Amino acid sequence: MRDLCFLSVMSCEEAQLHKERLQALAEKRKRQTEIEDKRGQLDDMVLQLQHLKSKAMRERWLLQGTGLEEENVRRTQLEQDEKKGRGWKA
């Protein structure tokens, strides 16, 4: 009888440990998923920033051969794009 009580106590303790391990694994997986999501968001932001930089560089190149009026319009657009790019960086 004494051995049976000891075994049931051990199995309860083992069950509790098993439950805690499962919870720890679930929390770890949740954190890993959150990290992967944040990395994906960061990658998207980097791509958007690269696109804005590329667009601004192209606009600068196009400004080199335009008239004064067109240049002012494009320069305004370029400045807006560069501000957006700086906003992403910050």
Image: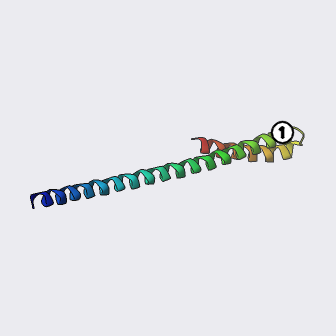
- Three-letter amino acid code of the residue under disc 1: Trp
SS at mark 1? helix
- Residue 11 placement (x, y as % from top left): 23, 58
Q: Would residue 70 be found to the left or right of residue 36 on screen?
A: right
Q: Quadrant of the C terminus?
A: top right
- Decide: is 65 above or below 38: above
Question: Which residue is label 1 attached to?
Answer: 61
Tell me which residue sits at (22%, 55%) in the image: 13
Find residue 46 and report its horizontal and vertical position in percent: 64, 44
**Picture residue at 80% right of the left edge, 48% below the top:** 73
8 horizontally vs 55: left or right: left
User: Which residue is nearer to you in this view: 21 or 71?
Assistant: 21
Residue nearer the viewer, 88 or 42: 42
**Against 79, is 15 above or below?**
below
* Position of the N terminus by quadrant: bottom left
Nearest the camera: 3 or 51? 3
